[in-house]
């Protein structure tokens, strides 16, 4: 599955797997992993847009901020 995901979704999934493996297992078991990843990806893209297009921030710096702001230790993905 991971090879067919967009880059940002793969980054999110890798972060979740390393920091919240139990959550990933629960989402997989309930069939909710892909919807949760899609929603988190949409939020990440929106934040990246705000940081890069609106605030004129460098993309790499914006990506780092976005990943740290909401993805550093997820207890649950946003619903």
Image: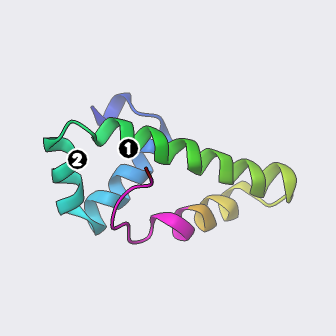
Residue placed under numbered mark 2 in the picture: 27
SS for dot 2: helix
Residue 56 location, x and y as percent?
A: 86, 57
Residue 61 location, x and y as percent?
A: 68, 65
Q: Nearer the viewer, residue 12 or 43?
A: 43
- The residue located at (26%, 65%) in the rendering is 20
Q: Is residue 55 above or below residue 19?
A: above
As drawn, the residue found furthest toward the front would be 79
Q: Nearer the viewer, residue 62 or 40?
A: 40
Residue 47 location, x and y as percent?
A: 67, 54
Answer left or right for 50 relative to 18. right
Q: What label sits on residue 36 in the rendered view? A: 1
Is there a contact, CB below 8 Å, between mark 1 and mark 2? yes
Q: Is residue 8 above or below residue 2?
A: below
Q: Check residue 76 for magenta coloring.
A: yes
SS for dot 1: helix
- The residue located at (45%, 38%) in the rendering is 38
As drawn, the residue found furthest toward the top would be 4
């Amino acid at each position: 599955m991971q090879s067919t995901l967009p880059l940002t979704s793969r980054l999110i999934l890798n972060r979740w797997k390393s920091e919240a493996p139990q959550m990933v297992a629960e989402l997989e078991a309930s069939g909710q992993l892909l919807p949760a990843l899609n929603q988190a990806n949409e939020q990440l893209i929106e934040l990246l847009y705000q940081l890069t297009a609106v605030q004129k921030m460098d993309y790499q710096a914006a990506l780092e901020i976005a990943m740290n702001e909401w993805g550093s230790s997820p207890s649950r993905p946003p619903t």
